[in-house]
Image: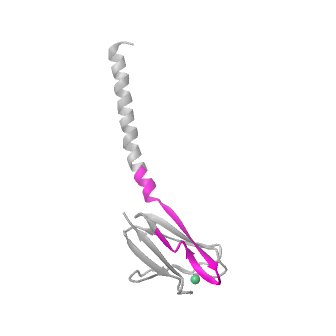
Amino acid sequence: MNLRRILRVVAVAIVAAGALQLQSVPGTLHAASTQSVTVHVREINNQYVFRPAKISVKPGAKVTWVDNSDAPHTVTGTKGWSYSSKMFTQGHMVSITFKKAGTFHYICSIHPYMKGTVVVRG
Ligand SMILES: [Cu+2]
């Protein structure tokens, strides 16, 4: 292998490494934007609760509520958040993708004592 050929091989390796690096940047952003968090609905001491009651996620995160209780529930916004999910029952779930930063308070419209908060922070 003469010097020119060696330099060419090195140059190709550098370009390939650069391409890999460029690809890894959007890949990382993609991973962050598809953050996925689950909140469970459980019955504790004869009261239905969202667990965890408060979560913190990044913009773009998908939050899924799973009903692990024997009653139907909703995810219904309060304190300035106008949103209501469909009713979901035991073994079923609803999901919301949170695109914007903010603090989102919610209750269950069937059991208004159930309270939860999603904090979306960039
Ligand atoms: Cu409920």
In the rendered view, does 45 fall on the left or right side of 55?
Answer: right
Q: What is the x, y in percent for residue 83?
A: 45, 80
Q: What is the x, y in percent for residue 36?
A: 50, 62
Q: What is the x, y in percent for residue 18?
A: 36, 36
In the rendered view, does 67 fall on the left or right side of 108?
Answer: right
Q: Closer to the camera, 24 or 54?
A: 54
Q: Quarter of the picture for ligand 1?
A: bottom right
Height in image: 86 above or below 96?
A: below
Q: Which residue lies at the image location 57% right of the left edge and 79% below the top edge? A: 49
Residue 74 sits in quarter: bottom right
In the rendered view, does 92 fall on the left or right side of 100?
Answer: right
Q: Which residue lies at the image location 48% right of the left edge and 65% below the top edge? A: 62
Residue at the farthest right position? 70
Where is the C terminus found, in terms of image quarters? Answer: bottom left
Q: Which residue lies at the image location 37% right of the left edge and 38% below the top edge? A: 19
| Magenta-colored span | 28-55
